[in-house]
Amino acid sequence: MALRNNMRHILNEESLSNASSRSASRARTPKVDGEENGQLDINFSSIEELLTTKLESLQALLESQLGQTDDLGMESTSNQDIRQKQIGQLNKARIQSGSTTINDIIYSLSLPRNEISSQSRELLLAQLYKLIVSKPLVTYNEENAGSSSYVSDDKVNELIKIFLSKSYRSDSEFLLMFRSCIALICSDIEEFGYLVSAEFLGAIQQLLVDPPTSVVTNENKANLVTGLCSLLLVLHNGSSSFGIDEKVAELLDIAEGTAKSALTLSQQLEAGDREYSTLFDANADKQIVNEATQKVRSEVNFAAATLHGAGCLLTLMPRGSYLNDFISEHMPKLVEMVDDDVNIEVAKAAGRVIGLCYEVFSYSEEEEDNDDEDEDYNYNAPYYEQAALFSVIERLANISTKKVSKKERKEAHSIFRDIQATLINYTDIEKRTAIYRKSQEGQELLNSMFDSTYIKLSKTRSLPINSWFLYLRLIHLKWCFSFGVHNQLVSNDSIRDILREPATDYELKYGTSGDHAPDDDAAHHANTSDKYGDDEVKRTQRIRKARVNKLASEMDELELR
């Protein structure tokens, strides 16, 4: 039982994997260090359960083997059978052993499929992911420099090639392989970022647009888009946003189409409109309904993940007139998707992105003539037809339909009240300025929009999560690193920088006049300066910018079918 107990301890370490298949989106922002994880639960519960299940399955297999004889000569088997058994036992021993390394498992995964079963591969991948996220790779490699355990770029590239070979045979194997690839690359983006090739990104994007299969299901497509956006977030943060606008537009188009499909199918199910339904008996009709319901659920999850991904990438775009125009152009799609009280998860995801748009929009600081002001319309905001949008959000904040469970209604009420507060505060010049100044009043306004949480980095330093900008970034880091996200934020500068908002126009012009600036800012900059030196930091930023610009150019040349 040692492995099982150890696994449970690890998965509960940060209270980040306590999700269950019954859990729904909890209200307000995610509680990374506490008992509530908010939207993190609903997005990633199945992945955490998969990881736990695979490792507990291994324990059961190992326990059953203890009662079996090791005498292969007592069985009438071929040499090939004996070899496969020996390899299988070796792989299982690697998973069981506390000394097993990332390199050991990548080597096992590189073996031909006729030498390692699908079950063994899934167990190895579960163990691989656990090893990757349990300790930040930057720390792990420092401790193992010069040893055979050191994870080199060649080893990471080997894992990427295994993924690109498409040798996976089950949806579980595919998901564990993909998540391990993304987590390993993001663990040390400075060393492994150059391995993110156009071929690798193109393969991921092709899987997104291809029809779902038994392996790359719609559920796995939701993970694909989240993983892709997690990778792009880590890769582009602090370097370049070249080509990001096109990615956001593509994701919004995908989300729009998927959301419409889910809504249409939901309405057909509610109306009992099923083609040829009279030709089937009750059991067959029930099966059809169950399959259609599952399809709706998977499409809703895919649409929500795609919307969150679009919002995550939107945070990479620099603020200014171009971003304003981009937001205004795509707001009608978001407003259409948020106006959905049938598939409430789509509405919540669209609402969060709308909240982000109101945060990052660059408002004119000139007051309009109040005598001519029309409250129904607002040129100085992301969406011109302001009253119509506010009405939709108000309705969702008080949703009472029986199509949604009581628990879901309660959660939706809280989330849409947060979104409503965001829209109201950012369209009011006095409240908006107070937020930008980070004054006492501004902090109170932020607290009214979010049930703020703080990620403790040390006894004196913490990271506040009190905006849609940080929220959308955090849920993608959570997907990437799971229960290890806290360790990454403490030990990995590149990851910690992701949860730092850019300075507002007010701060750039006047500086921060409030008394509630993040406690870790000064210490962080001091540590960065001490560790790298200003010249080294600038050099690294130039290299990363050139790298991602080149990659974006190569991606433009790809034509996805």
Image: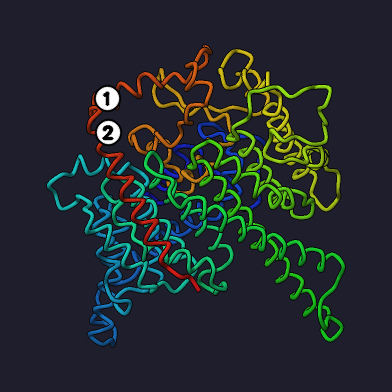
Query: In which quadrant of the rendered view does residue 453 lie?
Result: top right
Question: Is 19 rendered above or below residue 51?
Answer: above
Residue extending farthest to the left is 146
Q: Nearer the viewer, residue 123 or 372?
A: 372
Q: Are marks 1 and 2 in contact (CB under 8 Å)?
A: yes
First of labels 1, 2 by sequence position: 1
x and y, in percent, of residue 238 in the image:
38, 38
Q: Which mark is residue 497?
A: none
Pointer 1 local density, CA inside 10 Å: few below 14, some 14–19, many at least 20 = some
Q: x, y percentage for residue 406? A: 80, 44
Q: Position of residue 297 (x, y in %)?
A: 68, 61
Residue neighbourhood size for the residue with mark 2, other residues' Cα within 10 Å, grouped as few (<14), some (14–19), many (≥20): some
Label 1: which residue?
529
Asked which secondary structure carries label 2, the reply is helix
Please tell me which residue is depicted at 54% across the width and 31% down the height of the picture: 34
The residue closer to the viewer here, 467 or 433, is 433
Residue type of the residue flagged with mark 2: Val
Foreground pick, 409 / 369: 369
Q: Give the x, y percent position of residue 60.
A: 43, 61
Q: Which residue is mark 2?
A: 537
* 13 in relation to 122, above or below: above
**In the structure shown, which secondary structural element does the residue marked by tag 1 occupy?**
helix
Q: Is residue 464 above or below residue 517?
A: below
> What is the distance, in whole Å, between disc 1 and disc 2 at their CAs?
8 Å
Q: Amino acid at mark 1?
A: Ser
- Residue at 58% from the left image edge and 53% from the top image edge: 305
- Residue at position x 30%, y 70% in the image: 88
